[in-house]
Amino acid sequence: MAPAGYELERLVGRGANGRVYLARAQGDRPVAVKILEPLSVESRRRFAREAELGRQLRHPALVETYDSVLLEEGAFLVLEYVPGRPLSEAIAGGAIGVLGTLGLIRDVGGALAYLHGVQVVHRDVTPRNILQTKLGTRLCDLGLARPLNVTTLLTDAGSLVGTLEYLGPELVRGEDAQPASDVYALGASAYHALAGRPPFLFESLVSLANSISFNAPPDLRRTCPSAPPKLTELIQSMLEKDPTDRPSALEAVTLARGINPEV
């Protein structure tokens, strides 16, 4: 099943909200087609929001939205096809090193600074939604993104939105997402990329939520002693419990650009 004018070739990804296929548009142009599933009332609302935001947002480190199609039998987003692999696959085998982690903060932090500048929060910054390419890292999946003037952290079912290992303490407490929440999620992803494990290990939902809320993650200065001290300090600052103590996305990018990977 594909929207008219597109031919699906192969499955390239699967996320919480659907499947993504490499496809060919008319003229043989490669694109990515995201098929939303299941097609519930809530998922239709989410699709409409993702499609509207995608058409409005343009940044070099954001995957571009070309088109959207909503039919009775399905909902489709036509996206820029970005050859690469999710960061989640890269870190499944361990850390990706200092250079990769710095690039992650610079690129995805830049995309977040842009989103926050236009009053949008992503709300699902995780290694699964970060693509590694030959030209850097790209942030994808606006399925949970919201304008800042739209509140409500919970879905209709009353469950937390996002991936728990990368949620900030304020979200675990049930507060609304804010730009600092995206910064925390990027910091948690960068921590995982550098250390080869997330800040807090998943033992149970309750224990993980408690650790995020009250415990400090293992000190990166001891976990990764060969990493530049300024990098470990930056990541730790992005994971501060109080959102007001975290740098903004733009500040994080600026700091990352000033870090010498050899020091």
Image (spheres, helix red, strand yellow):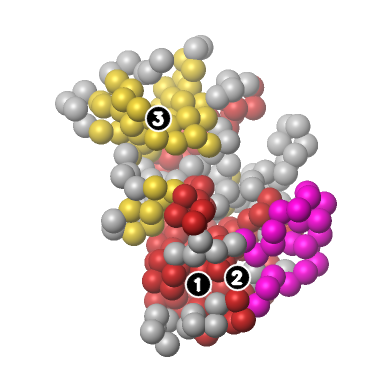
Q: Position of residue 115 (x, y in %)?
A: 48, 54
Mark 3 and mark 1 residues within 8 Å of each other at the beta carbon:
no
Towards the viewer: 126 or 169: 126
Looking at this view, name the residue that lies furthest to the top: 72
Quarter of the image for residue 173 reads: bottom right
Question: Which of the two discs, 2 and 3, labels the residue nearer the N terminus?
Answer: 3
Q: Whole-percent x and y of residue 166?
A: 63, 56
Q: Nearer the viewer, mark 2 or mark 3?
A: 3
Q: In this picture, is 118 found above or below 37?
A: below
Disc number at residue 252? 1
In space, the residues marked 3 and 1 are separated at their CA atoms by: 35 Å
Classify mark 1: helix, strand or loop: helix
Disc number for residue 11: 3
39 vs 152: above or below: above
The residue under the point 73% across, 32% down is: 156
Estimate the x, y position of residue 48 in percent, counting from the top left. 52, 30
Classed neighbour count for the residue bearing mark 3: other residues with Cα under 10 Å, few (<14), some (14–19), many (≥20): some
Q: Compared with residue 83, is residue 20 higher up or lower down, i.e. above or below? A: above
Q: Residues within 10 Å of mark 1 (few under 14, many from 20)?
A: many
Of 65 and 201, nearer the camera is 201
Q: Write the start and end of the magenta stretch as one range.
A: 198-219
Kind of residue sitting beneath label 3: Leu
| Separation of residues labelled 2 and 3 (CA atoms) | 34 Å
Q: Circle 2 is placed at which residue position?
A: 238
